[in-house]
């Protein structure tokens, strides 16, 4: 059975996990499709710092060495893409079907492990953990280790941004408040008639509600750990 590994605290990039997608050459973007369509897959790219990249590469190298055949390259080629800021990107995916059999959709859970709704759409910029299976392969004369997507845990969720192409204009239509109670005022109740003399502050003094503002979650701060190939030279022996 393929080895499973969890990539922790990485930034999700262009996740497509709610359903299968395929890249459409005509519109130059991924579009939803049937799981059995050619190229259909679930996928999520991710950004990681140098330490995370090193740990993942060593796991991939161990899986590669364990399955390596005589005709394969002796060393596993580094599949990660390095950015100018020292971070690395890679991708995990899962085909919609293998040999005609539809695959099980990757599980998505919240930070407490509670399964998310079936139509939940993860967003770019969210902090996640990604569970993958390490699959060594030989295809087209090239060998490497693919990351087969199994599950995603959402640690910090970035709400989906609604893009509004318009700015404000003068003299136009303005939506009125649809809440009929928004501007309503409540007249004070008349003082009860009583022969008794009331003490000062005898009424109920309701404390004003406290306005709470949600604190925006900080984006994970990427930190470069130096060139990955240089870091890993000593691990290749």
Image (spheres, helix red, strand yellow):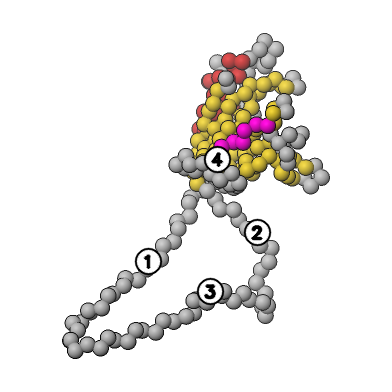
Q: Residues within 10 Å of mark 2 (few under 14, many from 20)?
A: few
Location of the C terminus (image quadrant): top right
Dot 3 lies on which element? loop
Name the side, left or right, on which 224 lies relative to 71: left
Task: List the residue tagged with mark 1.
Answer: 210
Image quarter (top left, top right, bottom left or bottom right) of the N terminus: top right
Q: CA distance from mark 2 to mark 4?
A: 25 Å
**Residue assigned mark 4:** 108
What residue do we see at 70% from left, 40% from top?
A: 21
Query: Which of disc 1 and disc 3 is earlier in sequence?
Result: 3
Residue at x 63%, y 76% (from the top left corner): 174
Whichever of callouts 1 and 2 sits on the residue coming sooner in the sequence is 2
Nearest to the eye among marks 1 and 2: give it.
Answer: 1
Tag count in the figure? 4
Q: Nearer the viewer, residue 11 or 176?
A: 176
Residue 17, compared with residue 2, is above or below; it is below
**Residue at the top extreme of this rendering:** 70
Write down the quadrant of residue 28 in the picture. top right
- Residue beneath label 2, please? 163
> Mark 2 or mark 4, which has the lower sequence index?
4
Q: Which residues fall within the magenta stretch?
A: 102-107
**Which residue is tagged 3?**
179
Instruction: Kindly report the secondary structure that dominates the magenta region of the rendered protein.
Output: loop
Of circles 3 and 1, the one toward us is 3
């Amino acid at each position: 059975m393929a080895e499973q590994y969890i990539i922790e605290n990485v930034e999700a990039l262009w996740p497509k996990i709610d359903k299968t997608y395929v890249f459409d050459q005509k519109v130059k973007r991924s579009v939803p499709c049937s799981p059995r369509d050619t190229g259909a897959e679930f996928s999520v790219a991710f950004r990681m710092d140098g330490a995370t990249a090193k740990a993942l590469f060593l796991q991939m190298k161990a899986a590669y060495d364990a399955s390596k055949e005589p005709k394969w390259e002796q060393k596993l080629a580094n599949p990660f893409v390095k950015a100018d800021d020292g971070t690395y990107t890679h991708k995990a995916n899962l085909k919609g079907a293998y040999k005609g059999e539809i695959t099980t959709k990757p599980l998505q859970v919240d930070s407490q492990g509670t399964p998310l709704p079936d139509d939940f759409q993860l967003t770019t910029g969210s902090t996640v953990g990604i569970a993958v299976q390490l699959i060594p392969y030989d295809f087209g004369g090239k060998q490497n280790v693919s990351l087969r997507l199994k599950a995603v845990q959402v640690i910090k969720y970035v709400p989906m941004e609604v893009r509004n192409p318009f700015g404000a204009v003068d003299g136009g239509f303005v939506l009125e408040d649809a809440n009929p109670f928004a501007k309503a005022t409540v007249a004070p109740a008349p003082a009860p008639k009583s022969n008794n003399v009331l003490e000062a502050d005898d009424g109920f003094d309701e404390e004003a509600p406290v306005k709470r503002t949600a604190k925006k979650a900080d984006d994970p701060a990427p930190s470069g750990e130096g060139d990955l190939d240089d870091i890993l030279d000593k691990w290749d022996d």
